[in-house]
């Protein structure tokens, strides 16, 4: 079934900008998330990409539904001094950045690389940190060859979003711990299955919302918990990203050489290949993602949930559309506002592409309006603006005290490295990580609810305890179980 189109209001004005190349867009997006410095190493000798033919794919796909991949009971729990053996599924920019910090963390060994695009595997091999002459023991276009390996302890899932649920659940069933990129899922039902799999198979599953490991976010959380901010009545989250220009429609055509496009589609409907719906730009299309609402909302709303100690809202209203680029090929809104209802406060989301100045002139952030002042936090630091004399003096805290706020940008690699280290530590201790899969799932509920509201054009009510839309079948179709293309299934 084709996705229901957004109920956009036509824009009176459009912002004319030349379209940027996909490589430049992807690089700037990655830089805005954690600014990884890419290093290059010689292509490891002996590592070969294993092609996946259509016949072998269909044969192995049919077998996938017949039996579980591996027994989770056979999973190894690494000791304090054991080297953790990892594999990467999804070798694009996000995956390479994740892998880089897994290897930087130390006492880890790269075992496998997997991607449906052979060129992405080759790119990951070129950009692997190689101080210990590490090289993958296996490369493949089929993730099942990776999960069949019983000597792999952890899997990094950095595929397009529509693959996150199946890869995470199957990895748990195969006895692997999972570091899965955000956004966790495309629907709430998928997220709940991921939580069930982690619990059933006793797996450590961390979502890649690295802000939970950032020193400024931890410090701001401590300040909020002290009670100095007072009762919070309004929370605002936002992402204003100015780098995206208009992407004109392109005709469908053949997939590039070396790409298993049928595997890329996976559980989604059969659809011709189009370069606008591939690699980085898949996130602007409903079958594969939820646009900026889920891509950056996963980060900001996660912090709001954490600070406020909440699970999910009881309703959402949203407006938005393609107001900046009405003729853009994208399906998701380039401009959107969401208002969520909670028992004792309300929360607002704003995003806009093509402009970079959000509230407080910051491109992204979380703002808490307390009775004693307003706290603002982003990846540069945090500060509190006092309400008259209710707080003694302005509170400004940065990783580099004394440096003007606007001029300071912390090393975002440290935040991400700390998040990876937390995951590796929890693999050994079997404790829940900072961004445990259930925490990630709860953060995604608000994102999915916001998108359901903008797609239906009405207020959507949510049963928090039962995780169900209230009396709205159309909205429920966007939030709950989607139909998977055969032979793919999401079974815990």
Image (cartoon, rainbow, N blue to C red):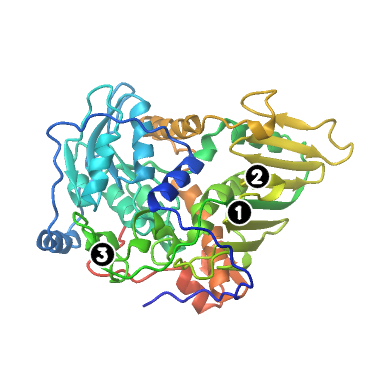
Specify which label sits upstream in the sequence, 1 or 3: 1
Left or right of residue 428, residue 69 in this image:
left
Residues at marks 3 and 2, CA–CA distance in whole angstroms: 42 Å
Q: Quadrant of residue 60?
A: bottom left
Residues at marks 1 and 3, CA–CA distance in whole angstroms: 39 Å
Q: Is residue 323 above or below residue 395?
A: below
Q: Is residue 331 above or below residue 363?
A: below
Secondary structure, mark 2, is: loop
> Picture coordinates of residue 367 (x, y %)?
69, 46
| Along the line of sight, the residue nearer the viewer: 3 or 200 | 3
Secondary structure, mark 1, is: loop
> Picture coordinates of residue 29 (x, y %)?
47, 47
> Picture coordinates of residue 268 (x, y %)?
32, 67
Give the label, 3 or 2, closer to the camera. Answer: 2
Specify which label sits upstream in the sequence, 3 or 2: 2
Residue drawn 37% across the image and 48% down it:
198
Secondary structure, mark 3, is: loop
Give the label, 2 or 1, closer to the camera. Answer: 1
Left or right of residue 345, residue 321 in this image:
left
Q: Quadrant of residue 97?
A: top left
Residue drawn 29% across the image and 63% down it:
265
Q: Is residue 410 above or below residue 159?
A: above
Residues at marks 2 and 1, CA–CA distance in whole angstroms: 11 Å
Give the label, 1 or 3, closer to the camera. Answer: 1
**Label 3 close to label 2 by CB (< 8 Å):** no
Residue annotated with mark 2: 362
Q: Quadrant of the N terminus?
A: bottom left
Residue annotated with mark 3: 488
């Amino acid at each position: 079934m084709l996705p229901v189109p957004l109920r956009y209001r036509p824009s009176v004005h459009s912002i004319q900008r030349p379209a940027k190349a996909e490589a430049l867009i992807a690089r700037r997006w990655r830089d805005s998330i954690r600014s990884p410095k890419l290093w290059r190493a010689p292509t490891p000798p002996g590592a070969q990409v294993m092609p996946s033919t259509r016949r072998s794919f269909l044969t192995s796909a049919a077998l996938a539904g017949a039996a579980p991949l591996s027994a989770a009971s056979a999973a190894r729990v690494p000791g304090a001094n054991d080297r953790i053996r990892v594999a990467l599924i999804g070798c694009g920019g996000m995956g390479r950045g994740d892998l880089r910090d897994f290897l930087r963390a130390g006492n880890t060994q790269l075992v496998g690389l997997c991607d449906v695009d052979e060129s992405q595997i080759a790119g990951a091999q070129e950009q692997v940190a190689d101080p210990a002459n590490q090289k993958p023991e296996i490369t493949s276009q089929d993730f099942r060859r990776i999960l069949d390996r019983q000597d792999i302890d952890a899997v990094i899932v950095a595929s397009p979003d529509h693959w996150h649920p199946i890869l995470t659940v199957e990895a748990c069933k195969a006895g692997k711990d999972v570091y899965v990129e955000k956004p966790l899922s495309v629907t709430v039902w998928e997220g709940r299955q991921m939580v069930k799999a982690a619990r059933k198979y006793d797996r450590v599953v961390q979502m890649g919302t690295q802000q939970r490991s950032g020193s400024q976010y931890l410090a701001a959380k401590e300040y909020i918990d002290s009670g100095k901010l007072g009762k919070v009545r309004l929370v605002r989250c936002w992402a204003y990203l100015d780098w995206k220009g208009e992407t004109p429609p392109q005709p469908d055509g053949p997939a590039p050489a070396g790409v298993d496009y049928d595997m890329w589609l996976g559980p989604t409907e059969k659809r011709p290949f189009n370069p606008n719906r591939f690699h980085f730009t898949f996130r602007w299309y409903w079958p594969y993602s939820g646009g900026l609402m889920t891509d950056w909302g996963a980060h900001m709303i996660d912090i709001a949930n954490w600070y406020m100690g909440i699970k999910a809202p009881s309703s959402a209203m949203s407006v938005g559309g393609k107001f900046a680029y009405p003729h853009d090929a994208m399906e998701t809104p380039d401009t959107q506002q969401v208002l969520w209802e909670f028992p004792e406060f309300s929360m607002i989301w704003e995003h806009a592409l093509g402009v970079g100045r959000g509230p407080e002139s910051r491109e992204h952030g979380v703002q808490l309006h307390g009775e004693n002042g307003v706290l603002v936090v982003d990846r540069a630091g945090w500060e509190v603006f006092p309400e008259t004399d209710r707080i003694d003096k302005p509170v400004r805290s940065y990783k580099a005290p004394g440096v003007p706020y606007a001029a300071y940008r912390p090393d975002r690699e440290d935040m991400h490295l700390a998040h990876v280290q937390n995951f590796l530590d929890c693999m050994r201790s079997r404790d829940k990580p900072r961004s445990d899969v259930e925490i990630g799932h709860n953060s995604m509920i608000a994102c999915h609810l916001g998108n359901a509201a903008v797609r239906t054009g009405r207020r959507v009510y949510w049963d928090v305890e039962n995780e169900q839309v209230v009396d709205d079948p159309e909205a429920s179709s966007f939030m709950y179980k989607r139909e998977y293309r055969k032979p793919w299934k999401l079974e815990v």
